[in-house]
Amino acid sequence: MYAYMDRCPSGPDPCGVVLQAGRGRVVFELPVLLPDEQFIPLDLIRGKSSRSSSSRVRWARPS
C-alpha cells in the first residue's frame, strides 16, 4: 500500500488492503471478501486506531 501511495500521490485514497495467501491488493471501496481473504482498513495500517497504544490487535486465524 505504501508503494501505491508513493507512486500515485495524487491518486484516490485507498480504504485498506485485502490479503489473500500472502499477497495483497489495495482497495478503494469496502470489499466483498472471499472466504480466504482478509481486509485490513487503512486506519489500522497507519496506526490511527481508537484503541489505546498499549492494546494489542489479535488476528483470528480461519478454521
Image (spheres, helix red, strand yellow):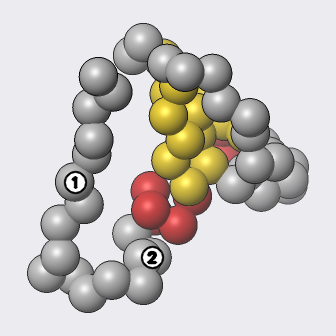
Q: Hey, which residue is sitting farthest right in the picture? A: 11
Image point (27%, 32%), residue name? 61
Relative to residue 37, is residue 7 depicted above or below? below
Task: Name the quadrant containing residue 55.
Answer: bottom left
Relative to residue 37, is residue 57 depicted above or below? below
Asked if residue 5 lies left or right of residue 38, the reply is right
Image point (17%, 66%), residue name? 56
User: x%, y% of residue 37?
Assistant: 53, 25
User: x%, y% of residue 26?
Assistant: 66, 36
Q: Nearer the viewer, residue 51 or 35?
A: 35
Image point (55%, 21%), residue name? 35
User: x%, y% of residue 28?
Assistant: 79, 46
Q: Which residue is mark 1?
A: 58
Q: Nearer the viewer, residue 7 or 53?
A: 53
Asked if residue 61 lies left or right of residue 1, the reply is left
Q: Secondary structure at mark 2?
A: loop
CA distance separating discs 2 and 1: 16 Å
Image point (75%, 48%), residue name? 30
Mark with earlier residue (2, 1): 2
Q: Secondary structure at mark 1?
A: loop
Q: Which mark is residue 48?
A: 2
Q: Nearer the viewer, residue 61 or 11?
A: 61
Task: Name the quadrant containing residue 52.
Answer: bottom left
Numbered disc in front, either 2 or 1: 1
